[in-house]
Image (cartoon, helix red, strand yellow):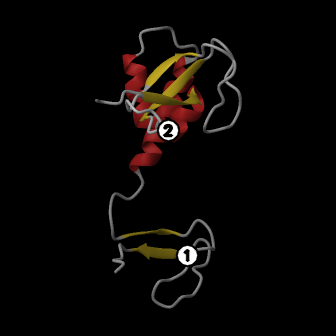
Amino acid sequence: MELEDIIEPAKSGRARCKTTGDKIPKGELRFGEAFVNTFSSSGSIGYRWHKLEAAAKRFPKKVKKALEAYEGEVPEREKLEGILAEALEKEASKPGGYPYADHAPTGRATCIVTGEKIPKGSVRVAVEREID
């Protein structure tokens, strides 16, 4: 069973966006992130609903694929395409594997060798560690 994410108009105004927590108004396009419902004995497919723009920022590859499959009218499609392009570019700039170096975005990280806090903005090297 292959899980396919979908884009569809909201059937009612009851669903909340899993990204922002805002209600999704009836008729507004929404993104459904497919998952296997483990509470069902048949393993049916369920959806986590997201507002389309919020999903484009969070899951750009999934939204792009679902958008290509969607046959209906998409209001403000150019704006959505811009958000997708920006999110995909940002995702592509992320490191792909270990080891890699980056600038510490916060001051909360701790060095695994010395145990000292890594200051915000300083260069750090991420390595994959093995835990016994």
Image quadrant in which the N terminus is located: top left
Location of residue 41 (image quadrant)? top left
Along the line of sight, the residue nearer the viewer: 24 or 111: 24
User: Closer to the N terminus: mark 1 or mark 2?
Assistant: 2
Location of residue 60 (image quadrant)? top left
Q: Residue at x 65, y 25 (%)?
A: 15
Identify residue for label 2: 86
Q: Residues within 10 Å of mark 2 (few under 14, many from 20)?
A: some
Q: Residue at x 48, y 37 (%)?
A: 39
**Which of the labelled discs sits on residue 74, or is there none?**
none
Type of amino acid under label 1 = Ser
- The alpha-carbon separation of the residues under discs 1 and 2 comes to 25 Å
Q: Position of residue 46 (x, y in %)?
A: 47, 29
Image quadrant in which the C terminus is located: bottom left
Type of amino acid under label 2 = Glu
Q: Position of residue 36 (x, y in %)?
A: 41, 35
Identify residue for label 1: 122
Q: Residue at x 47, y 84 (%)?
A: 112
**Side of 107 relative to 7 (left or right):** right
